[in-house]
Image (cartoon, rainbow, N blue to C red):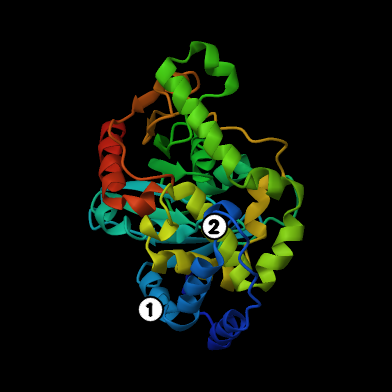
Amino acid sequence: MTEIQPFRIAVPQAELDELKGRLTATRWAPQLPGDEWRRGVPVAYLRELAEYWATGYDWRAQEARLNTFPQYTTVIEDLSIHFLHVRSSDTAALPLLLTHGWPSTFAEFTEMIEPLNRSFHLVIPSIPGFGFSGAPATTGFGVAKTGRIWAALMDRLGYHRYGVQGGDLGAYIAPETAKAAPGRVTGVYVNSGLGMPTEADLPELSSEETAFYHQMQGWAESGVDHHRLLRAAPQTFSHAWHDSPVGQLAWLIHKFGDFTFTETPDQAISRDWLLTNASLYWFTGTSGTSSWCMYDTTAFAWPPGQRVAPTGVYSGPPGIRRLAERDNDIAHWPQGRTGGHFVALESPAELAADLERFFASTSR
């Protein structure tokens, strides 16, 4: 049960053929009146993207690229955990564990591996319920347990001092990894999520900070509240996502549209990556199992962070450093952040450079 097994992605051709058949046989919904994107993902946009998925997108090329990175599986707490393990040529390099978000996958970090690998041994797991990792079989699974699994994974790999990073869902898991391994994590690096103001903070906010808070609230209220939706009825929606690749694609594109703050998500993130991400969800059947991070909660809350290790935050407004310092020892908060919510996809070089700066200061 403690063995580490090599892993290679190899989707059977029959599954590729079935996906193409389902895409070409889609029963398309009519376009509703009004401003298209305010009604959801427009029919014309989605139809063009689905046609490209069926006839232009090359899964085999993307599969081969993913397979250039060494991949493994191991069983921890009765769950099979899939991960990339890319060792640096520098044997003294710091191990760094990178944690993706929702509705993303481990492929979020593929553009960062080369620049980071000069300075770090990289461990990039698939969160339980995502991609090629096993899904939680009972309720009650949470970010704290994932943090313990990550600490056990690093221990199994022989890494006793290491850094951790996370964005989106990973911003909740990375601090929990430090809590699970006190004294062993040199630093916790979070892509936003810390220091986010709430209604209770309004009396102490400046006028500019208050404006950012209301802007954030307006964005949240104008989109689909996936936390509420997946908390209430994840099984209901997973029936459609699991059966229809276009239904799953529409959901993923809608959420990446919410997160990228561009007119269409492929203006910020490459179309091929968006389809690779959708393909990973489709071939592994994990559009429903990946929602555990929402369906066991009672309400949305920002990650509190931790004080076990120093924290670096790659953030911009409305994140406020002094609010983050209430629960974290903030050692790094750079100005001039680029990229949107999924910065590893939008600005991988900038994020990689900032990760190097932060961990150079914490691992001395």
- Report x, y in % for residue 136: 68, 55
Residue at mark 2 = 36
* Residue at mark 1 to residue at mark 2: CA–CA distance: 33 Å
Residue 199 vertical placement versus 273 (above, below): above
Seen at 47% across and 60% down, the residue is 83
The one of 152 and 50 positioned closer to us in this rendering: 50
Residue 149 vertical placement versus 221 (above, below): below
Could you tell me which secondary element the residue under label 1 belongs to?
helix
Please give the label number shown on residue 222: none
- Report x, y in % for residue 295: 71, 47
Location of the N terminus by quadrant is bottom right
The one of 309 and 330 positioned closer to us in this rendering: 330
Residue 250 vertical placement versus 194 (above, below): below
Image quarter of residue 341: top left
Q: Is residue 306 visible?
A: no
Residue at mark 1 = 61
- Report x, y in % for residue 51: 49, 78
